[in-house]
Amino acid sequence: MNALNLPVGLSLNLQILGDRSGNRIQAKILGYKLGESLIAEVPGAALLPISLRLGDEVVARCLVGRHMLGFKCTVLRVCISPYLYFHLTYPSQVEHTEVRQAERVVVAIPVQVITPVGEACEAEIRDISAAGAMLAASRSLGEVGEAVKLCFDLSFAQVARTLALAAVIRNVTPVQNGPHYRTGVQFKDMAEEDMLFLLSSVYEQSWRTPR
């Protein structure tokens, strides 16, 4: 049995098997003992989420470097002293999926863009990847190299979140038909939790998209 080599503090996304609501629990890894258990907590929680109970089978996902890891385990023990944390059974198998930064999926997501001069502009995300997105707008969102902020709703397994991401404009293309400008942006300094959610959503969309 190989060591997981997951760093302390790494975000761990938990899905309870059999929970049709699609809810996710965002935990953080505290440590593990090889072959015994994985120890985690829900940051800031005074009590465990009511949906997570002793004996629950869960699917855990986390992002390590350029790989998304996934494995099944069971809630083994819940501890309340000296603080709240829980043990998951040590996974016997771990799936590794390489993150392809350039893999894009076609979407149509409304987005609010804060331009370099501080103005709010409505646009639409036409495709998205782990690295960036293509925006369609009726006006210019800025020049190449300038920084913008994006605010949009994204879903994964029926869970919706609002992401607020910093980005840099990498290309601008005026078009004659439809929206007047297409703007390619690259995401910058994304939080690990946001990156994991974005990657999960992108891969879910790509699996649903006919090849």
Image (tube, rainbow, N blue to C red):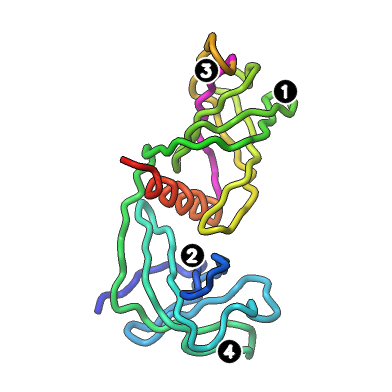
**What amino acid is labelled 3 in the image?**
Val
Residue on which the image places disc 2: 10
Residue 59: name its quadrant.
bottom left
What residue appears at the point 36 percent right and 49 percent down from the top-left corner?
99
Horizontal relation, residue 148 to residue 107: left or right? right
3 or 4: tag closer to the N-terminus: 4
Q: Which mark is first along the chain, 4 or 1?
A: 4
Q: Is residue 26 visible?
A: no
Question: What crowding class fits label 2: few (fewer than 14 Cα within 10 Å), some (14-19), or many (20 or more)?
Answer: some
In the drawing, what numbered circle is on residue 140?
Answer: none
The numbered disc on residue 117 is 1
Q: Secondary structure at mark 4?
A: strand
Q: Which amino acid is tagged 4? A: Cys
Q: At x 48% / y 80%, what residue is drawn?
A: 39
Q: Are marks 1 and 3 in contact (CB under 8 Å)?
A: no
Asked whether residue 12 is drawn in magenta, I would say no
Where is mark 4, residue-wise?
79
Task: Measure how far apart labels 1 and 3 are at the Cα level.
Answer: 17 Å
The amino acid on which the numbered mark 1 sits, given as a three-letter code, is Val
